[in-house]
Amino acid sequence: MGTIIRKVFTYLILPVCIAGLVYLNVDSISEPVNFKKHREYRESVAVQRLKDIRDLQVAFKNVNARYASTIDSLILFYNEGKMKITLQVGSQDDSLAMANTQKIKNKYRGLKPEKLNQKLHELYLAGEQNLVFQVSSEIPVKDTLFNHRTDFCVDSLAFIPFSGDSIIMESTVKKVSGVNVPLFEASMPFKSLLKGLNNQLRINLDAEREDQGRYKGLQVGSVTTPNNNAGNWE
């Protein structure tokens, strides 16, 4: 009877135990590797979205002299807003064109700058090529920003990738050295961005960031300290 038990243990139970230990050992090694791989991929998608928010915020500020306080405001700005663009015609290094332009300006000296540029534009369209001036016009934001991007979707702008949670965003105006400075920040906490991955490894990552005094996730801009709208991944 004892011999049979020893054989069962040796040929059945012991191999299963060894296989289990090997699996646990391999799993303990592969899990952090898989976590890192999926984390890096998710972060790459999230960083692009935060960059898109930053680009829209900069455009919004150029038009409104402040940053948008909500993602909905940015989406509305993208869908319905307009941006002023300036086209440079001719080169200031072209002395002949500069002299000809000045001659025409002298002729129409009484016109306001905007009307004068309009007159120069009319002359240019009529065939006068030796001119140097600027033409300003307003075009829809959506015809200017991201129109070369096939992966851009404005309707996804408000959400943290892979979780569906809302991006955290705020804006303010802070007095710096006596000057009012518009500021904004947009954030994606790892708790949302890495949702569904190994939770203990995510907790460890948060603890590491906290020890370093860094934000526990991805963030662009800052409402506390002007940082030229830098991302904390840069």
Image (tube, grey):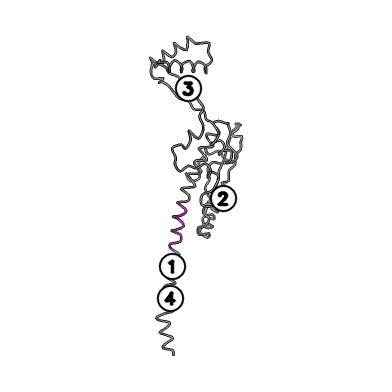
Q: Is residue 98 left or right of residue 200?
A: left
Q: Give the mark, 3 or 4, whose residue is nearer the N terminus.
A: 4
Residues under numbered marks 3 and 4 in contact, where contact means CB atoms less than 8 Å apart: no
Q: Give the mark, 4 or 2, whose residue is nearer the N terminus.
A: 4
Amino acid identity at mark 1 = Asn
Looking at the rendered structure, the secondary structure element under dot 4 is helix
Q: Give the mark, 4 or 1, whose residue is nearer the N terminus.
A: 4
Looking at the rendered structure, the secondary structure element under dot 3 is strand
Instruction: Say which residue appears at 43% left-offset and 62% top-offset.
Output: 30
Q: Which residue is mark 2?
A: 165
Q: Which residue is mark 4?
A: 16
Q: Residues within 10 Å of mark 4 (few under 14, many from 20)?
A: few
The answer for how far apart the CA atoms under marks 4 and 1 are is: 14 Å
Q: Which residue is mark 3?
A: 135
Q: Nearer the viewer, residue 38 or 226?
A: 38
Instruction: Say which residue appears at 58% left-offset and 40% top-offset.
Output: 72
Q: Is residue 189 above or below residue 52?
A: below
The image shows a total of numbered marks equal to 4
Closer to viewer: mark 4 or mark 2: 2
Q: Give the mark, 3 or 1, whose residue is nearer the N terminus.
A: 1
Q: Which residues are magenta?
A: 29-40
